[in-house]
Amino acid sequence: MIKSHGPAFRKQAMELAQCPACRGKAVIKGVFHDLACVQCNASGWVAGATGEALPVDELVTQLSLRLQAAQRQINELKEPRVSGPEAIYQDNNRRGAGGSNRTLD
Ligand SMILES: [Zn+2]
C-alpha cells in the first residue's frame, strides 16, 4: 500500500516545460490586471513528462534546483575559466582559502 504514489524521498530535478497556457510568464493578461495562471500554479512551469502543474511543495523544490543550476551557470559566465597554467593557479588559490564549502548566495 505504501509503495506507490507518495512523495519521493530523494529530491531530484525533473524535466520542466514551459506552461502552454501562460507561455512561461506565470500570469495571464487580464483586461485590468494580470491573473495568476492556474494551469501551472502561477510558476510558468509544468511537469515536462505530463504537462501538468506540479504540486506547490514540489514546485518550490524543483524551482530551487533549477535556480541553483542557473546560478552556477551565471557564476561560471562571470568568472570564465581561463585555460592554461594560469587557470590552474587561480583555481588552487580559490579553493585553498575558503575550504570545501560552497555557498550559493
Ligand atoms: Zn501557466
Image (cartoon, helix red, strand yellow):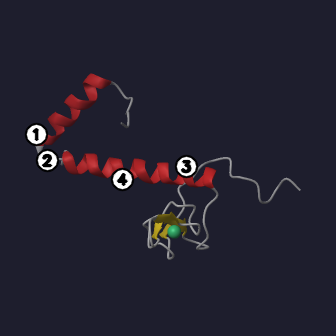
Identified at 14% across, 47% down, the residue is 82
Q: Amino acid at mark 3?
A: Thr
| C-alpha gap between disc 3 and disc 1 | 38 Å
- Front residue of 91/6: it is 6
Q: Residue furthest bottom?
A: 20
Q: Which residue is mark 1?
A: 86
Q: Amino acid at mark 2?
A: Val
Identified at 59% across, 49% down, the residue is 11
| C-alpha gap between disc 2 and disc 1 | 7 Å
SS for tag 4? Answer: helix
Q: To which quarter of the image does residue 98 belong? A: top left
In this rendering, which labeled residue sits more in front, label 2 or label 3?
3
Whether residues under marks 2 and 3 lie with C-beta atoms below 8 angstroms apart, the answer is: no
10 Å crowding of disc 1: few (<14), some (14-19), many (20+): few
| C-alpha gap between disc 4 and disc 2 | 21 Å
Q: Which mark is residue 82?
A: 2
Q: Position of residue 14 (x, y in %)?
A: 54, 61
Sequence-wise, the earlier of marks 3 and 1 is 3
Q: Position of residue 47 (x, y in %)?
A: 57, 67
Whether residues under marks 2 and 1 lie with C-beta atoms below 8 angstroms apart, the answer is: yes
Whether residues under marks 4 and 2 lie with C-beta atoms below 8 angstroms apart, the answer is: no
Q: Which mark is residue 97?
A: none
| Above/below status of 28 relative to 102 | below
Q: Position of residue 70 (x, y in %)?
A: 36, 53
Whether residues under marks 1 and 4 lie with C-beta atoms below 8 angstroms apart, the answer is: no
Sequence-wise, the earlier of marks 1 and 4 is 4
Q: Amino acid at mark 1?
A: Glu
Q: Which mark is residue 70?
A: 4
Q: Position of residue 30 (x, y in %)?
A: 47, 71
Q: Which mark is residue 61?
A: 3
Give the left or right position of residue 81, taking residue 27 as reference.
left
